[in-house]
Image (cartoon, helix red, strand yellow):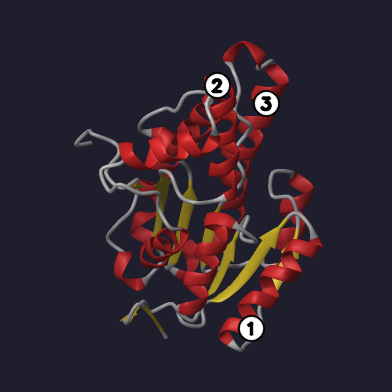
Amino acid sequence: MSSNGLDLGIAGKTALVCGSTMGLGNACASALAAAGAQVVVNGRTAKTVDAAVKALEDRFGRPFKGVAADVTTSEGRSILLAACPDPDILVTNAAGPPPGRFEDWDETAWEAALAANMVAPIMLIRQILGPMRRRRWGRILNITSGAVKAPLPMLGLSNGARSGLTGFVAGLAREVARDGVTINNLLPGNFATDRLHRYVAALAGARGMSSQDIWAEMESANPSGRIGVPEEFGAACAFFTSQHAGFITGQNLLLDGGAYPGTF
């Protein structure tokens, strides 16, 4: 099987994609399915999981598995890994914490952010890494945020938690590279997802502007003149989990249309 005409070499491999009923996670699941992977869809509710599974089955004409579980909790991760204990490919993904102001975030808010966007992916990696190393092949991809390189206003909880995950996996990636396992991060900028729409609404309220004006401002400020399309993100995910990406590890790929002005 191939994605965009390139044989990615992952046909038949099992890919566990967290938070894949919508948004960027769903785009990743679709791209991996197009490459022939046996995708396991995950979401918090049976309703959304069933709908996402049906959409994949209708599109590709073969069965897919879905697991309703909250990956940000230990109970949810146990359910998910019981259903898919030994994936070849793991894509970690969880909704970021809500936007807000620093003075509004107490210790509980910080603990929740760290649990969802740092501890949860680390615990998933901890469970599946051993079998990958023994097989001498595995791909782990974390969906983080462009804010890891350029922190965004009102997203301090996400900025902090995702940066912590980035620092941790940078070291781990070097430890397991000799075993044929790669660990990388995808850092999305502005993509047209429900989460971006919510962020735009919050930013509009804080600045006393309309959401439409904020959206147009984001488009005009980007060097590409537009907001990203989720399918573009999914294609990057498919490549980074492919046989062709075996010499790429410990990296942070920024997908932001050139918005970040730095060279590193």
Screen quadrant of the C terminus: top left
Screen quadrant of the N terminus: bottom left
Splitting the image into 4 quarters, where does residue 64 fall?
Answer: bottom right
* Amino acid type of the residue tagged 2 in the rendering: Gly
Residue carrying label 1:
58
Vertical arrangement, residue 184 with respect to residue 213, above or below: below
Helix, strand or loop at label 1? It is helix
Helix, strand or loop at label 3? It is helix
The answer for how far apart the CA atoms under marks 1 and 3 are is 40 Å
Helix, strand or loop at label 2? It is loop
Out of 96 and 89, give the one closest to the viewer.
96
Query: For this view, does 67 lie left or right of residue 30?
Result: right
Vertical arrangement, residue 4 with respect to residue 193, above or below: below
Q: Residue at x 65, y 61 (%)?
A: 21
* Amino acid type of the residue tagged 3 in the rendering: Glu
Q: Which mark is residue 126?
A: none
Q: Residue at x 62, y 44 (%)?
A: 95
Vertical arrangement, residue 35 with respect to residue 62, above or below: above
* Percent of width and height locating residue 136: 42, 67
Residue carrying label 2:
208
Q: Which mark is residue 111?
A: 3
